[in-house]
């Protein structure tokens, strides 16, 4: 086991750390902000073609802005785009459409259609690759330090397995993560069983692990699963998230240190 320190104070001994990705390891705000804005534009165009009146389109746009967490030129770290999976975002979006007279089948179909169109559009944009989600400052040094000290490292995210693979490839993190848990695993987070199953996969008890995330949903999930070292990270956003479920809080990764126990 290795000793984990927060600002040079010991918080316990661990065999593994589970990291969230977006907003924790990955600097995702710019990318997610562009994604949210583009989806709204595409939905607005779609409903104009469906002859929805201007007032309803204006209201629909306001609802989407609120649900997605757009705030001028930044994004709420507590909103669905930042935290929820793609499927959950489609469901929340489709739910809004039902308020405007569309049945569930229509709402879900429109949501899936536009999400797919936006993905294709953004992937074809010149320069989009430069806007992808890069590592937050200090993350790589921490990950390398953990590997050197023999601590297992897991990545748990509501992104897809493909998204995980792209993140690892883009940031040259091959060989860093021992385990992955994506939105395609069952159950997915924030179900506490997801943590329990991941720990079984690692052959560790939850009490042997720490979890680091920028979302209260993750932090609460970890505590319910039996993880005692639950670390909130609020350094990945323009407006830091307010975290109420953390046991420890850091703003920069250099606030964490790892000491070998032997």
Image: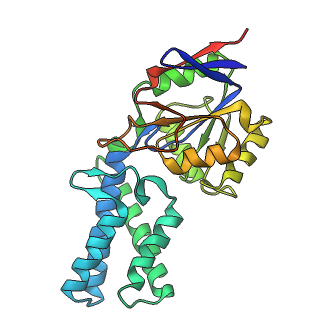
Which of the image's four quarters has the C terminus?
Answer: top right
Compared with 165, 71 (above or below) is below
Residue 99 quadrant: bottom left
Estimate the x, y position of residue 127 in percent, counting from the top left: 29, 46
Residue in the foreground of this view, choosing between 86 and 2:
2
Q: Residue at x 70, y 58 (%)?
A: 186
Residue 185 quadrant: bottom right
241 relative position to 157: left or right: left
> Quick check: can you spot residue 124?
no
Estimate the x, y position of residue 199 in percent, counting from the top left: 74, 40
188 relative position to 244: left or right: right
Which of the image's four quarters has the N terminus?
Answer: top right
Residue in the foreground of this view, choosing between 28 and 172:
28
Q: Residue at x 55, y 25 (%)?
A: 143
Estimate the x, y position of residue 101 in percent, counting from the top left: 38, 91
Estimate the x, y position of residue 244 in percent, counting from the top left: 47, 44
Q: Residue at x 21, y 55 (%)?
A: 72
Q: Residue at x 73, y 46 (%)?
A: 196
Residue 124 quadrant: bottom left
> Quick check: can you spot residue 92?
yes
Compared with 220, 187 (above or below) is below
48 relative position to 219: left or right: left
């Amino acid at each position: 086991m290795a000793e984990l320190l927060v600002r040079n104070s010991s918080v316990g001994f661990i065999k593994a750390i589970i990291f969230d990705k977006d907003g924790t390891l990955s600097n995702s705000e710019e990318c997610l902000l562009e994604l949210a804005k583009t989806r709204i534009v595409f939905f607005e165009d779609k409903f104009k073609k469906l002859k929805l009146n201007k007032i309803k389109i204006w209201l629909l746009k306001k609802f989407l802005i609120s649900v997605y967490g757009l705030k001028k030129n930044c994004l709420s770290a507590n909103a669905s785009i930042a935290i929820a999976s793609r499927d959950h975002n489609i469901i929340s979006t489709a739910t809004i459409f039902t308020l405007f007279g569309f049945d569930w089948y229509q709402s879900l179909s429109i949501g899936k259609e536009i999400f797919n169109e936006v993905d294709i559009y953004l992937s074809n944009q010149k320069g989009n690759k430069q806007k992808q989600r890069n590592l937050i400052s200090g993350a790589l040094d921490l990950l390398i330090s953990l590997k050197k000290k023999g601590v297992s490292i897991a990545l748990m995210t509501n992104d897809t397995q493909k998204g995980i693979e792209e993140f690892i490839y883009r940031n040259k993190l091959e060989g860093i993560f021992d385990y992955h848990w994506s939105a395609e695993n069952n159950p997915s987070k924030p179900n506490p069983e997801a943590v329990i199953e991941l720990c079984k996969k690692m052959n560790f008890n939850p009490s042997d692990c720490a979890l680091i995330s920028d979302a209260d949903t993750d932090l609460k999930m970890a505590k319910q699963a039996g993880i005692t070292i639950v670390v909130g990270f609020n350094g990945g956003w323009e407006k830091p998230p307010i975290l109420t479920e953390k046991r420890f809080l850091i703003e920069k990764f250099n606030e964490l240190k790892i000491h070998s126990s032997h």
